[in-house]
């Protein structure tokens, strides 16, 4: 299975998140899956990719040509695809992945999350989306989505198109 991981590329990502990310990557490789990700060397991206690489897994990195102005490249990817834009990158993530696991991250992670959620809601794909709520990182987001639903801004059933996991084991329980 090709597991797409969205998450922070920041050098300041807390170790409490990156340690769990490394374990996620290790389990991806040990279970015979491959990683699809944004190609960054730092933060959640680097931690998960390192876990996959250190355990002999396959890694596909997809990033726009200019992203290295912001992030350092993970140098141990099995395959690398460079794109001209973020839109092209996100399209390839969708095409090349079987499931999405969203780890803690910033603007880019939220952009990617809401794109795959919206496309699933609009029946443009049927792939699993798992919000990996490490150390309660996404509690506030989950709460505001619930409020939006209760206020009628999100349609009935729309919150059922993704799952929430709080551990690496739970991520894989939800994948299967």
Image (spheres, rainbow, N blue to C red):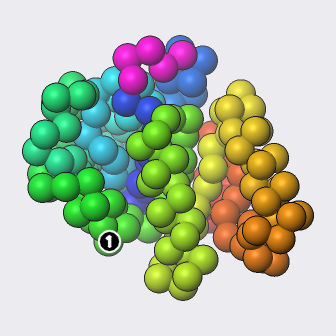
The answer to whether residue 24 is left or right of residue 60 is right
Residue at the spot of label 1: 95
Between residue 141 and residue 92, name the one nearer to us: 141
- Residue occupying the point 81% across, 65% down: 149
Q: Is residue 99 visible?
A: no
Quadrant in which the N terminus appears: bottom left
Q: Is residue 40 left or right of residue 157?
A: left
Q: Position of residue 39 (x, y in %)?
A: 25, 40
Judge whether 35 appears above or below 91 on screen: above
Instruction: Give how far across and how far down residue 162 sits, in percent.
Output: 67, 63
Residue 29 position within the rendered picture, expressed as x and y whole percent measured from the top left: 40, 44
Q: Nearer the viewer, residue 25 or 163?
A: 163
Give the residues in magenta.
10-14
Residue at disc 1, secondary structure:
helix
Asked whether residue 89 is drawn in magenta, I would say no
In the rendered view, would you say 81 is above or below 157? above
Q: Residue at x 33, y 60 (%)?
A: 90
């Amino acid at each position: 299975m090709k597991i797409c991981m969205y998450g922070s590329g920041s050098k300041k990502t807390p170790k409490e998140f990156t340690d769990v990310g490394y374990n996620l990557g290790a389990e991806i490789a040990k279970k015979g899956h491959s990683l699809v990700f944004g190609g960054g060397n730092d933060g959640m991206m680097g931690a998960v990719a390192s876990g996959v690489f250190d355990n002999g897994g396959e890694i596909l990195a997809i990033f726009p040509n200019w992203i290295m102005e912001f992030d350092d490249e993970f140098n141990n990817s099995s395959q690398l695809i460079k794109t001209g834009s973020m839109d092209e990158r996100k399209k390839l993530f969708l095409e090349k992945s079987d499931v999405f696991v969203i780890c803690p991250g910033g603007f880019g992670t939220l952009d990617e999350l809401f794109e795959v959620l919206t496309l699933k809601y609009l029946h443009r794909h049927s792939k699993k989306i798992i919000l990996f709520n490490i150390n309660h990182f996404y509690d506030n987001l989950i709460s505001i989505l619930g409020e939006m639903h209760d206020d009628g801004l999100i349609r009935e059933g729309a919150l059922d198109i993704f799952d929430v996991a709080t551990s690496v084991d739970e991520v894989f329980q939800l994948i299967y």
